[in-house]
Image: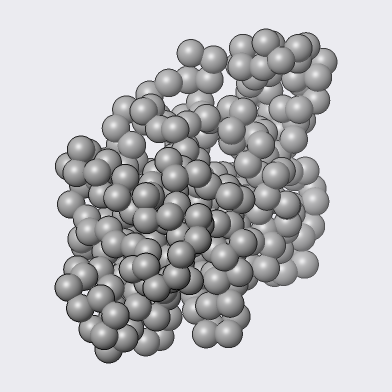
């Protein structure tokens, strides 16, 4: 709670509106109630109002301060349909189909964020990843001068000697199955930016592998080495103060004693606060292993590279996890242009 407590304090000073498309999911309702009670801003629940109220009553939860919107009868639906048509007409989408799509909560929520009617979106507690990401990519799209969308898990472990006082940013754990060198470098830089934004520290980014500095030879290791060099180059060009090193095994990245034996001159090894995995298999497995075996607090997936703040949660998330993710998305929204200059200025279809 050290980390998420600091995030909550920041957001209390600049409250934000977060839309939750899964309005009838009990964990989401509990998180939305906590979001309001902690004075973090205005939670917006999407779905049938009667069903949301029934679920809230069964949980003995007050809906004071929580806004309820049913996309199917919203006064914004017509305008949202027209905006969606601007975006998708080249794909052959006509008005009847656009109207049906825009009644779906994830699409409606994405459009709310795109049209500045909400500051961020949090979904995924009861939806598969594709159902969350597809509307975001169709409606919100990538931030200016950004080529890669990915995701990050923010993990907090009890042992403060790991990462940054126990906090690790881990990517990509949810979007790109097998990133290219170019994409892997982008993932490293984007995650470093998020780490600096959330933790206000110099990111120390370890590009992970089963090899440390040539202890094995394989094309996949070469990809990690090339991505590390490219990430450092791009960070320097963008004037992002961060250190990148790779390829590193996980123990060399996190354990000072082992790092001193394997890579004694590294500015990252043994002190990494950002971990970049070589592919989605390793990233997803690693994050879930840390969450369940080490009982780490897990907040994510925080989506990287989009024009507006959003997150795709795990279906295994608790109400506490959802609250933490919403707080992180809200804090991003406070000054999102520090992460992505020029973001948030375009409307859908422009």
Using the rendered view, name the quadrant where residue 87 is placed.
top right
Report the residue at 69% width, 11% height from top. 89
Q: Is residue 344 left or right of residue 263?
A: right
Q: Residue furthest front?
A: 217
Q: Is residue 182 above or below residue 212?
A: above
Q: Is residue 49 left or right of residue 286?
A: right
In this view of the protein, can residue 304 be seen by the observer?
no
Q: Nearer the viewer, residue 115 or 308?
A: 308
**In the rendered image, which quarter contains the N terminus?**
bottom left
Q: Is residue 289 above or below residue 122?
A: below
Q: Is residue 91 left or right of residue 276?
A: right
Q: Is residue 5 above or below residue 105?
A: below
Percent from the top left, x then y, of residue 257? 27, 89
Q: Nearer the viewer, residue 200 or 77?
A: 200
Q: Nearer the viewer, residue 290 or 297?
A: 290
Report the residue at 73% width, 52% height from top. 127
Q: How is the image coloured?
A: one colour
Using the rendered view, name the quadrant where residue 309 is placed.
top left
Q: Is residue 41 left or right of residue 266?
A: right
In this view of the protein, can residue 316 be seen by the observer?
yes
Percent from the top left, x then y, of residue 275? 40, 65
Percent from the top left, x then y, of residue 233? 24, 44
Tell how many labels.
Answer: 0
Report the residue at 29% width, 62% height from top. 245
């Amino acid at each position: 709670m050290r980390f998420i407590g600091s995030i909550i304090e920041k957001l209390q000073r600049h409250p934000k509106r977060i839309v939750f498309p899964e309005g009838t999911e009990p964990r989401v309702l509990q998180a939305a109630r906590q979001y309001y009670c902690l004075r973090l801003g205005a939670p917006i629940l999407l779905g049938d109002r009667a069903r949301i109220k029934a679920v809230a009553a069964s949980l003995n939860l007050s809906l004071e301060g929580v806004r309820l919107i049913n996309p199917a009868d919203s006064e914004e639906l017509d305008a949202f349909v027209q905006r969606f048509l601007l975006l998708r007409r080249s794909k052959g989408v006509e008005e009847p189909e656009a109207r049906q799509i825009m009644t779906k909560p994830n699409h409606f929520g994405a459009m709310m964020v795109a049209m500045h009617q909400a500051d961020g979106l949090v979904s995924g507690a009861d939806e598969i990843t594709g159902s969350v990401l597809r509307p975001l990519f169709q409606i919100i799209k990538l931030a200016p001068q950004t080529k890669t969308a990915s995701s990050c898990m923010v993990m907090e472990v009890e042992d403060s000697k790991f990462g940054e006082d126990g906090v690790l940013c881990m990517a990509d754990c949810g979007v790109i199955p097998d990133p290219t060198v170019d994409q892997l470098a982008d993932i490293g830089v984007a995650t470093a930016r998020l780490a600096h934004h959330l933790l206000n520290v110099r990111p120390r980014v370890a590009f992970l592998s089963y090899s440390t500095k040539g202890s094995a030879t394989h094309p996949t290791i070469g990809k990690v080495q090339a991505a590390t060099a490219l990430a450092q180059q791009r960070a320097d060009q963008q004037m992002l103060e961060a250190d990148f090193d790779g390829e590193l095994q996980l123990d060399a990245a996190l354990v000072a004693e082992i790092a001193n034996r394997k890579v004694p001159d590294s500015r990252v090894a043994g002190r990494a606060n950002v971990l970049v995995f070589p592919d989605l298999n390793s990233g997803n497995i690693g994050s879930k292993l840390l969450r369940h075996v080490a009982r780490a607090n897990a907040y994510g997936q925080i989506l990287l590279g989009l024009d507006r703040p959003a997150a795709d949660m795990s279906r295994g998330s608790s109400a506490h996890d959802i609250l933490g993710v919403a707080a992180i998305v809200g804090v991003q929204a406070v000054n999102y242009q520090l992460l992505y200059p020029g973001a948030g200025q375009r409307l859908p279809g422009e």
